[in-house]
Amino acid sequence: MTKLLPIALIAALASPAFAEGKLTYFTWSGYELPEFHEAFAKAHPDAVEVSVFGDDDDAFTKVKAGFHPDLAHPCYDKIARWNAEGLLQPIDTARIANWDKIFPAFRNLPDIQAGDGKVWMVPWDWGNTSILYRTDMIAPDAEMSWNMLWDPQYAGRMATIDAVHDTPLVAAVLAGVNPFDMDEAGMEKVAAKLREQRPLMATYTTDMTSVEQSLASGEFVAAMTWNASAVALKKQGVPVEFMNPKEGMLTWTCGFVLLKDAQNVDLAYDFINSRLEAGSGKALIENYGYGASTTSAFAAVPAATLEELKLPAEPQKMLETTIFTGPMKQNDVLAKMFERIKAGG
């Protein structure tokens, strides 16, 4: 009897990332821009093939199913999961030219350490998750708090991110529970907080384009978003602000991992090094309003631009005060609970 291949594997095998003699790079849509790796493109013309994924879970599923890129671009809170499946090989920091220019807050993350001068991930981009709100549609004295997404007066006019490391994490913070290590009682508190929020939400989504459109039209008053949405709407002249909640923004970081069976290791190191050049980070900051992982990238961006983008002049200090999105011990249980609650359970 012929065994059918999983759909995810069929899709992966059909991908152009299997072209021979080129670096294969698996990343988020929008992160393939050539200005992010100009030095690599100059040294190796037409030597990278890009495949994109929708989110971290999509990336993990495809790689686990048999898709074999050289480099992938997941986020930090998922690294332990990739390692548990034996998908990665360590990256030698001695071969990373600007390793020491990466902010210590990222360089020293516990779950990327592979011992002996090696790491499982090279951090490249980071950003904040917070509430993007219409300044002309909320009370002038509104409290700058995550509680805005639980405010009944805005029922049906808000959206939140459909991901376990975003909305449930915030629910945990508001419930006074450690989001990264919950006991059964803590899980119940988080569940109660999520059930309280559910009837107030217009949608749970990761489609930031539709959220931005709804905020621009006035259909939404507030939504959980990332930095780039604030940048996009301000460029359009929409009166919005990206909140700095009293409980703290969420901060995430993503970066490059070298797959265990990578075929083009030397090209992978060249690519990572080009991405850590100051000009690459500057392009990331100015294009998307996200932070780059290096001090040199921030030094290359004018102070006025950083202020306009609501990025700190001294990221290390800010990174020490936000809620850093790391691995959640109860991730799978929490994810199932979140799905039940969104469905009305």
Image (cartoon, rainbow, N blue to C red):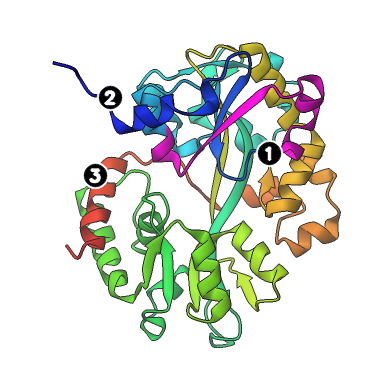
Q: Quadrant of residue 139?
A: bottom right
Q: Residue 327 at what x, y percent from top left?
A: 41, 38
- Of 286 and 304, nearer the camera is 286
Dot 1 or dot 2, earlier in sequence: 2
Q: CA distance from mark 1 to mark 3?
A: 31 Å
The answer to whether 29 appears left or right of 104 in the picture is left
Dot 1 or dot 3, earlier in sequence: 1
Q: Which residue is mark 3?
A: 333
In terms of secondary structure, where does tag 1 sit? loop
The amino acid at mark 3 is Val
- Of 7 and 168, nearer the camera is 7
Q: Is residue 308 magenta?
A: no
Location of the C terminus (image quadrant): bottom left
Q: Image height check: is 18 above or below 199?
A: above
Q: Residue 270 at what x, y percent from top left?
A: 72, 19
The amino acid at mark 1 is Ser
Q: Residue at x 48, y 80 (%)?
A: 219
Q: Residue 339 at what x, y percent from top left?
A: 25, 54
Please indicate, yes or no, whether residue 83 appears anywhere in the rendered image.
yes
Q: Quadrant of residue 333?
A: top left
Q: Which residue is mark 1?
A: 293
In terms of secondary structure, where does tag 2 sit? loop
Q: Is residue 42 magenta?
A: yes
Dot 2 or dot 3, earlier in sequence: 2
Between disc 1 and disc 2, the foreground one is: 2
Which range of residues does the magenta coloring cover?
Answer: 34-59
Q: CA distance from mark 2 to mark 3?
A: 28 Å
